Image (tube, rainbow, N blue to C red):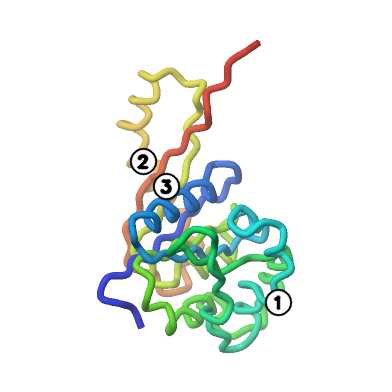
Amino acid sequence: MKRDFQRTIAIVNNKGGVGKTTSALNIAAGLAMRGRKVLIIDIDPQANASLALLGPGVLNLPTSIYDVLLEEDKPLRDILTPTPIKGLDLAPSHPNLANAEVNLTAVLGREKVLKRSMDRGLEAYTYIFIDCPPSLGLLTVNALLTGILQLLVSLLLSSMVGRDSRTRFLRISAPILGALSFRQLSGRMSSWTKPSLTINLFLTMPPSRRGP
């Protein structure tokens, strides 16, 4: 069950290094610091969000999102872990999640395992962020089929581009790139029921690099 207001947001891109995890962490932490109850679901085998929040010890936790996906009817609430940021909890990942897509091939309804695990026990959260891997594989599909209300497609806008060029890029390319991303994701999900969601292009920018 969901509370009266609960927004689930997936941050995706099939390319790595575009700021998905950094964006998820900073937005979630900012909302938690404003008094919201926030959950990050780390569904990326690289586990960067988990490592950033809890350090290397997170890899020694007895359970992770891998167990939720592979153990029948295991609820997500069983693996939730508080973080040092008040109001922000984590569903941790683990590198063994890299094997999940292969192990899920024989599971009936494998594209909705995460959705089923979220049916109960998450009512306290106002915002749920899903940090996805850099691919459009089964893990990302599971995130998209959780009933998310918003999809953030994270794109890296190079700091080497001039300010005027960046402005033109935002004005002209954003709606086009958003549409392309939607078609790509929709094609991957064509055999399943697609959720009703809002797609937003989320641009990230690295720090400026200056020569010696």
Labelled pair 3, 2 in contact (Cβ < 8 Å): yes
- Residue 148 place in picture, x, y as percent: 38, 67
Q: Residue at coordinates 42% horizontally, 65% vertically from top-left?
A: 128
C-alpha distance separating marks 3 and 2:
6 Å
Q: Residues within 10 Å of mark 1 (few under 14, many from 20)?
A: few
- Residue linked to disc 1: 62
Q: Residue furthest top?
A: 212
Lower position in the chain sequence, tag 1 or tag 2: 1
In three-dimensional space, the C-alpha distance between marks 1 and 2, rounded to whole angstroms, equals 44 Å
Q: Which residue is mark 2?
A: 176
Placement of 37 over or under 28, stated as above or below: below
Q: For the point 40% across and 61% down, which residue is it?
A: 9
Dot 2: element: helix
Which amino acid, mark 3?
A: Leu
SS type, badge 1: loop
Q: In front of the other: label 1 or label 3?
A: 1
The residue to which callout 3 is attached is: 180
Q: Residue furthest left?
A: 4
Residue at 57% of width from left, 63% of height from top?
A: 42
